[in-house]
Amino acid sequence: MSTPITERLDDPEAARESGRRKMDWARQHMPILAALREEFEADRPFAGETVGMAMHVEAKTAVLAELVATGGAEVAITGCNPLSTHDDVSAALDAVSGVTSYAERGVDDEAYYAAIEAVIEHEPSITVDDGMDLVAAIHEDYPELINSIVGGAEETTTGVHRLRAMDDDGELDYPVFAVNDTPMKRLFDNVHGTGESSLASIAMTTNLSWAGKTVVVAGYGHCGKGVAKKAAGQNADVVVTEVEPRRALEAHMEGYDVMPMREAASVGDVFVTTTGNRDVIVEEDFERMADGVLLANAGHFDIEVDLDALSDLAVDTYEAREGVRTYELDDGRRLNVLAEGRLVNLATPIALGHPVEVMDQSFGIQAVVVRELVERGGEYAPGVHDVPDDLDREVAEIKLAAEGVEFDELTDTQREYMDSWQHGT
Ligand code: NAI
């Protein structure tokens, strides 16, 4: 069983101070969470609830956890990836009243899952996941808790994908909101957030330029679109690989070169996988790659680049820079893997994750979804649920107001016209 992070640090006070500063900075740029904080401080909607969270424990997530605690909940939190935790932020969070944080960077598999169990031992009434680890562990190992769980919220595409598969098999025994799928999350976080932060993290980890490079983006979904657009904006040539014909066509019409990975392997300088799938770059591709290529993954799990095959091919491997492992092949070519093939925007040593403003939106949705579960959780059957549209609109309106952006409203005549099938030409 894991212990809270504070008990494992040499100098917890210094860590807390550093983590608090990071949280203060994030909080200043999160107007949606600030507006919800005012509401939750007044109403204490989560009094009596225990919220278990498994998320990337860095400053923005910490502001969300703190907000939920401000609303009256007891919060127990751990990481959802062994390399994305910031220990100082975890320590600062552990010191927030009502919050226990078990997250620690760089833990092995055993300690990672022990921390998930420690969160579950708090007997959450609501779960908030990024990748579905809590839901999976509860269903597999703590089914006796399910009756007292009102519901859950899931942050990312891969988590929602797994939950839908579980639901299709009739195995999901409580309601979970697909936070990932709302416009306010997916159209901003996955596209702009992943695009900006993946490129920033790769550039800062390697100190290399984008201009003049050929960037191969695997998968032209939400994340892939963001990575491709931002790479093109940095004067790179972009190549897209896809398995879905309409997405491939979309990339083609956007002006990118589209080709199979086998061909892209021999033209790319930088490879970024964003598919949520496995074995996207494999041995046959490594064999075609040029000396010095960079391999990065922005999908949820570290299975998109086949690192086992690359290890087998390599005659030597070494850390070329912090966060960059070089695999040297017998013909002398060096293939460079960032962040051990884990989420490049969160798992390199200097990674900061998505920009704060983007996470304000995603976590604004998380917060109103937790409120919805407390207020109306009993009305939702077990299974995956879309976030009600009025909640998504509520968060958009808070954001627009904070940005000072005004927008039009439908007139009654327009509303009547839009709702009618009788008006033709
Ligand atoms: P999406 O479903 O919109 O896009 C995935 C795309 O990959 C689809 O177009 C699909 O056809 C394509 N694809 C699947 N297998 C492929 C293959 N073998 N080769 C080429 N293309 C393939 O999903 P989204 O929202 O873009 O998410 C992708 C992944 O990124 C997920 O694992 C998600 O959890 C993760 N994610 C990561 C974030 C980060 O911070 N790095 C943020 C949000 C999501």
Image (cartoon, rainbow, N blue to C red):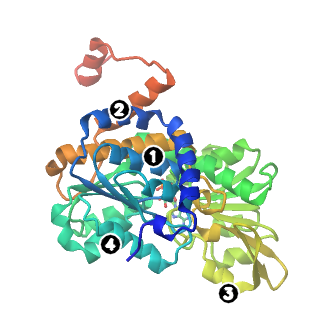
Measure the alpha-carbon separation of dots 1 and 4.
25 Å
Q: Which residue position is annotated with label 4?
A: 137
- Which is nearer the eye, 181 or 119? 119
Q: Secondary structure at mark 3?
A: helix
Give the image location of residue 110, x and y in percent: 45, 80
Label 4: how many residues lie within 10 Å, few (<14), some (14-19) or many (20+)?
A: some
- Which is nearer the eye, 416 or 361? 361
Give the image location of residue 4, x and y in percent: 42, 66
Amino acid type, callout 1? Val
Amino acid type, callout 4? Ala
The image shows residue 42, relative to residue 20, as above or below, that is above
Amino acid type, callout 2? Glu
- Which is nearer the eye, 258 or 157? 157
Left or right of 48: which side holds 89? right
Whichever of labels 2 and 1 marks the residue nearer the N terminus, that label is 2
For residue 131, which quarter of the picture?
Answer: bottom left
Measure the alpha-carbon separation of dots 2 and 1.
14 Å
Q: Which residue position is annotated with label 3?
A: 312
Whichever of labels 2 and 3 marks the residue nearer the N terminus, that label is 2
Measure the alpha-carbon separation of dots 3 and 1.
42 Å
Point out which mark residue 63 bears.
1
Whichever of labels 1 and 4 marks the residue nearer the N terminus, that label is 1
Q: Name the quarter where the C terminus is drawn.
A: top left
Residue 274: in sight, yes or no?
Answer: no
Residue ID at (18%, 51%): 380
Residue 364: in sight, yes or no?
Answer: yes
Amino acid type, callout 3? Asp
- Disc 2 under 8 Å from ligand 1? The reply is no
Whichever of labels 4 and 3 marks the residue nearer the N terminus, that label is 4
